[in-house]
Image (cartoon, grey):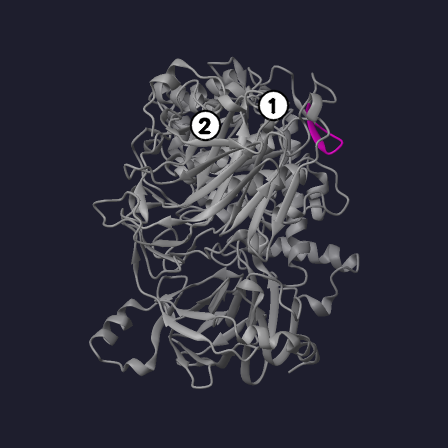
């Protein structure tokens, strides 16, 4: 044991007696054979050269053999590491054994199925907090890892093992530690074995509990109620955010957007700070017919959005150009009409000049069939004259195209004031899969960079090979990537400016390089971030997929929002892609958490990825839940309204006028408890796994959900209660007044929403095997208290709303000790789901006619 760990455990000795009496830490063996524990897990991680992540999953074929008793059960559960060609790179077994002394032993063996090079093949632990030994690397025979509840586990090895710990939250993961020599490329011969033997124990001496997970399918019943999902808010309802007047129509009326002092402002409104909130449209969702476009634009306004990102549009747009027709059946006309309607509604547009347009090799002057891999093309724009010429040809076509519905070309459109040159174009994107290391143009660029670096004594010859492009992780990889990005920026910016385009420009929009390399040259900075982005275990974008599904507050996510304007760089900062992805159970907290953090950390724009990926999903009643689309996910869509209030309306950024101008938002993040709260004058709320949250005048206590007697009778029952369901609850004044004085308040109660029939590998819901259909809301209840001013408080009434915002029932409420008190539940007495509530103090004819609960 190294000295640090020895000191760490000595410090724990005083608490050992208390910890020993605590409930055993549960280790749960998943279907793929690896284990999870509260807040993390232990398994195998694998990366191919260039840090291309490999899928590690249950070996289904071997599992079927086990079922037929061909292989003994004591051999452990089978897993496979999937190669880049889809075949098995390694086949392995993992076995966990509960020992008599209360510890658990683990044995993991992986056998190479062919000669193969690996960037990393290692035992990996992920966990919810920074490890006691710190980040970086070392060697030890034991290693302490944090787990939930402020406790820890101890990994012990037969001898010293190398370890490397890092904060992987910036890539959508958690804190991680890897064990073995795993930071340099290793070549495995066919039949070669990698093996890890270790013991897991509780440092306090308490025994561990080892259980095995079982497949889990979610269906309607006592825990899940059907939620009728409407995509369009009823006009004038509490969900119609057009009344907040967050759009200043038409877009562009105040002239071009400028970057001034690290913030956005319009040239016609000097000194007035501007920010943007919206969502991405992808692929065919950018090309609705005119009727659907009108519906979509009106929906964006009622969602409260003042911005949209047109994304993954360039393939269809290029096809439309080549077709040479400009009719309503043509993609170009459909996009033109949609953009014109957005501009007219006061919704600003951002886009990228290259995203996913297929580029034939011959179009860049190469005598080869097929198309250039997309991620390679993005890099070639900076180092291949033919690729740069192709980029210019299509950038010119897009920017000089005149929209017949506005009479303006895109380059002259102040309603499109933010443009990215190349989407996610960093060198590390697809480095191995796209063949960047072996591409002659990239290699030539590396040699050119190396000569400059040698001359400037930045890259010593002993540290960097002349004939090999460095892979991610190499000490000079980031320097070379920055050099290439600078080439892209200089070339492409000069071309766009020569066309007369005045939009603000950026590049490198998936990076974490703020203040480094060429980012200081950009007009604004764009950083994408995700929580629970899916990891595909076999084939890209095909099931099964894995997500961590851990409480993002405990994990400190999203880390991107904590480092805005770092390194003394003052420039506007946006995220044109962000999401708490489905089917993660914590995505309901995404809007209130990201909205508060982005506002308070100085972000200037957020675009949820995505609103929709297809035309079909835009139609009410069509489309099922997926990883990203808000249009078919009630949980994400409802969560977005918190972000609109906190970020765009400015509730958490002190942009309000009058008596509450200088009110400071109170944001509290409790990693230990896994809870958060935000209190602003107009929006208050929070998230908790259990217990009580205090958020200014709003407080709530999560109650145990009631257990129904049967699936056919989903109403309340007194036969038993479960523990509380984790929930996000927030309230926002719709009239812009402080909550205590507001005459109309929206309250949202979010637990989890899943598709009926969704199937997971086990109860941790980390491995998704099958999507479900429709929408089910998880049962959850809470006691809510809202402090109100005495004037008119006696007339306040509470209404349950459907997902269109229509009032469907009055909720009993009392007013005592200056607070309105009532109970909310995601399951109505008739067994249907509900997530929205409204408070009013001015009875209307609609109220009088509503059926009382």
Quarter in which the C terminus is drawn: top left
Q: Is residue 700 left or right of residue 57?
A: right
Q: Is residue 261 magenta?
A: yes
Taking the spot 63% from the left edge, 79% from the top edge, the residue there is: 139
Q: Is residue 822 above or below residue 443?
A: above
Q: Is residue 272 magenta?
A: no
Element carrying mark 1? loop
Taking the spot 53% from the left edge, 52% from the top edge, the residue there is: 552
**Residue 511, x across and y down, in percent:** 61, 48
Give the residues in magenta. 259-265
Magenta stretch, main secondary structure, is: strand
Judge by depth and name the residue closer to the eye, 58 or 203: 203
Q: Is residue 822 above or below residue 768?
A: above
Judge by depth and name the residue closer to the eye, 840 or 628: 840
Instruction: State the mark number for residue 838.
Output: 2
Q: Mark 1 — residue?
A: 737
Judge by depth and name the residue closer to the eye, 409 or 164: 164
Does residue 326 show up? no
Quarter in which the N terminus is drawn: bottom right
């Amino acid at each position: 044991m190294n000295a640090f760990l020895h000191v760490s455990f000595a410090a724990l000795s005083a608490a050992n007696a208390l910890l020993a009496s605590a409930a055993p830490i549960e280790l749960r063996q998943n279907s793929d054979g690896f284990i999870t524990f509260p807040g993390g897990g232990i398994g195998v991680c694998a990366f191919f050269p260039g840090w291309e992540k490999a899928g590690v999953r249950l070996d289904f074929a071997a599992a079927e053999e086990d079922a037929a008793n061909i292989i003994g059960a004591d051999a452990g559960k089978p897993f496979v590491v999937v190669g880049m060609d889809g075949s098995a790179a390694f086949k392995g077994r993992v076995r966990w054994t509960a020992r008599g002394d209360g510890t658990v032993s683990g044995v993991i063996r992986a056998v190479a199925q062919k000669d193969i090079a690996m960037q990393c093949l290692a035992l990996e632990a992920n966990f919810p907090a920074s490890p006691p030994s710190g980040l970086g690397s070392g060697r030890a025979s034991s290693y302490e890892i944090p787990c939930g509840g402020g406790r820890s586990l101890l990994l012990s090895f037969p001898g010293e093992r190398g370890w490397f710990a890092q904060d992987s939250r910036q890539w959508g993961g958690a804190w991680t530690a890897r064990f073995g020599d795993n930071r340099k490329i290793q070549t495995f011969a066919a039949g070669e074995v990698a093996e890890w033997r270790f013991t897991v124990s509780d440092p306090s001496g308490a025994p561990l509990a080892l259980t095995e997970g079982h497949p889990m399918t979610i269906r309607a019943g006592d825990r899940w109620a059907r939620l009728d999902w409407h995509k369009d808010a009823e006009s004038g309802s509490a969900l119609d955010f057009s009344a907040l007047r967050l759009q200043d129509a038409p877009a562009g009326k105040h002239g071009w957007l400028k970057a001034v002092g690290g913030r956005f402002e319009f040239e016609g409104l000097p000194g007035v700070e501007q920010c943007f909130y919206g969502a991405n449209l992808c692929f065919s969702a950018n090309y609705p017919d005119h009727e659907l476009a009108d519906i979509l634009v009106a929906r964006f306004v009622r969602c409260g959005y003042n911005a949209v990102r047109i994304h993954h549009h360039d393939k269809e747009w290029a096809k439309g150009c080549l077709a040479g027709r400009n009719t309503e059946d043509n993609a170009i006309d459909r996009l033109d009409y949609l953009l014109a309607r957005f501009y007219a509604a006061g919704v600003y547009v951002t886009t990228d000049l290259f995203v996913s347009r297929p580029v034939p090799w011959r179009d860049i002057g190469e005598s080869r069939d097929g198309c250039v891999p997309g991620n390679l093309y993005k890099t070639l724009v900076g180092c291949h004259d033919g690729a740069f010429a192709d980029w210019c040809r299509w950038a010119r076509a897009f920017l000089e195209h005149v929209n017949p519905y506005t009479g303006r070309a895109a380059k002259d459109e102040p309603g499109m004031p933010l443009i990215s040159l190349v989407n996610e174009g960093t060198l590390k994107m697809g480095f191995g899969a796209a063949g960047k290391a072996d591409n002659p143009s990239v290699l030539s660029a590396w040699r050119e960079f190396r000569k400059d670096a040698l001359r400037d004594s930045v890259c010593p010859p002993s540290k960097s090979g002349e004939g090999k492009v460095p892979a991610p992780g190499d000490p000079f990889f980031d320097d070379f990537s920055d050099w290439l990005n600078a080439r892209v920026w200089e070339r492409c910016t000069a071309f766009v400016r020569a066309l007369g385009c005045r939009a603000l420009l950026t590049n490198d929009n998936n990076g974490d390089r703020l203040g480094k390399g060429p980012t200081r040259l950009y007009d604004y900075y764009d950083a994408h971030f995700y929580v629970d982005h899916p990891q595909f275990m076999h084939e890209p974008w095909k099931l099964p997929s894995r997500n961590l599904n851990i409480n993002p507050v405990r994990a400190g996510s999203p880390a991107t929002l904590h480092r805005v304007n770092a390194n003394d760089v003052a420039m506007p900062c946006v995220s044109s892609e962000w999401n708490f992805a489905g089917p993660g159970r914590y995505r309901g907290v995404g809007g209130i958490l990201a909205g508060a953090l982005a506002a308070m950390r100085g972000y200037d724009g957020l675009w949820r990825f995505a609103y929709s990926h297809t035309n079909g999903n835009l139609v009410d009643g069509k489309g099922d839940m997926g990883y990203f689309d808000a249009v078919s996910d009630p949980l994400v869509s409802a969560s977005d309204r918190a972000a609109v209030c906190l970020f765009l309306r400015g509730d958490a950024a002190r942009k309000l006028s009058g008596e509450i101008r200088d009110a400071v938002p109170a944001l509290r993040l409790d990693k230990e408890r896994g809870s958060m709260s935000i209190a602003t004058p107009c929006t208050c709320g929070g998230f908790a796994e259990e217990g009580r949250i205090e958020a200014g005048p709003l407080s709530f206590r999560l109650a145990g959900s009631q257990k129904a007697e049967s699936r056919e009778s989903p109403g309340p029952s007194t036969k038993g209660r479960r523990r509380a369901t984790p929930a996000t609850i927030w309230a926002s004044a719709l009239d812009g007044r402080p909550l205590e004085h507001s005459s109309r308040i929206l309250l949202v109660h979010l637990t989890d929403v899943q598709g009926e029939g969704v199937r997971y590998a086990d109860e941790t819901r980390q491995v998704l095997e099958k999507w479900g259909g429709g929408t089910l809301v998880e049962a959850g209840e809470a006691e809510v208290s809202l402090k109100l001013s005495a004037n008119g408080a006696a007339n306040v009434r509470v209404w349950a709303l459907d997902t269109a915002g229509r009032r469907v029932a009055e909720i009993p409420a009392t007013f005592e000790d200056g607070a309105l008190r009532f109970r909310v539940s995601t399951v109505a007495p008739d067994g249907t789901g509900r997530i929205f509530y409204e408070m009013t103090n001015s009875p209307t004819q609609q109220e009088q006619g509503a059926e009382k609960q």
